[in-house]
Amino acid sequence: MSKFPAHIRLIKVETLSEDWNVLRRYSLEHRSPDGSVSIHHREVVHKPDTANVLAYSRTRGTVLLLSQIRAAVALVGNAERFLEVPGGIVDSGESPAAAAIREVREETGIVLDCVRLVGCFYLSPTLSTERSYLFLADLDCVTQKSSAISCTDTLGEIELTEIPVTEAVAMCWTGAITDAKTALLIFALANTGACRKGDTLHD
């Protein structure tokens, strides 16, 4: 249900596309304090919530990132391969923590026992309804590893790369890492360090 303030009224909804995501055009009536009325249009991409995980090793002082092709980034002439954390859609009936653990298993083959929630954020509120749950995970606590499951929605194979934490922080500042959720998690890790007892979410 929409939650617009009293001076804004939703008057029309048009569905422009229903494919991987749903794109709708909204017409909004805005009433100013002087009584004048204006009509504004907004196109919004409706996307499910996502869960994303920065896995790190305290003993090695490293983080685990994925390198893959992102069409939107390539289309505007930027990096051929995009560095980011594992993550994906939270399925219906699935908790964000469970989705985070599943996505890491599918994309890296690593079976996590627990993840620590950093927060939930809107990554592009001017355009999308997507909320992203961001987690940290301690690789030193991993007790098992499975075979990585192929991800069918990628353009080519996913490559795993392990980077020193200090280097990852520097890459965020220099623009080598440009994914917002990944940078936020790297800065969070650099600020908070390792998981603290009592802060974990278990599936």
Image: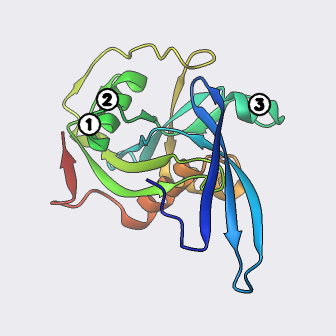
Q: Position of residue 178 (x, y in %)?
A: 66, 48
Tell which of 9 and 166 is nearer to you. 9
Dot 1 and dot 3 residues touching (CB under 8 Å): no
Dot 3 and dot 2 residues touching (CB under 8 Å): no
Residue at left offset 60%, top offset 37%? 83
Q: Residues within 10 Å of mark 2 (few under 14, many from 20)?
A: many
Of mark 1 and mark 3, the one earlier in the sequence is 3
Check residue 44 in the rendering and tell me which mark sits there, or answer none.
none
Check residue 98 in the rendering and tell me which mark sits there, or answer none.
1
Amino acid identity at mark 2: Arg
Q: Rounded to the nearest whole Å, what is the CA distance between mark 1 and mark 2?
A: 6 Å
* Tally of numbered discs: 3
Quarter of the image holding residue 100?
A: top left
Tell which of 63 and 155 is nearer to you. 155
Residue at left offset 52%, top offset 38%? 47
Above or below 127: residue 15: above
Q: Is residue 190 left or right of residue 178?
A: left
Amino acid identity at mark 1: Ala
Quarter of the image holding residue 143?
A: top left
Q: Rounded to the nearest whole Å, what is the CA distance between mark 3 and mark 2?
A: 27 Å
Quarter of the image holding residue 173?
A: bottom right
What residue did someone put label 3 on? 74
Residue at left offset 66%, top offset 26%? 69
Q: Residues within 10 Å of mark 3 (few under 14, many from 20)?
A: few
Q: Rounded to the nearest whole Å, what is the CA distance between mark 1 and mark 3?
A: 31 Å
What residue did someone put label 2 on? 102
Dot 1 and dot 2 residues touching (CB under 8 Å): yes
Tell which of 124 and 182 is nearer to you. 124
Label 3: element kind:
helix
Q: Position of residue 61 (x, y in %)?
A: 41, 49
Label 2: element kind:
helix
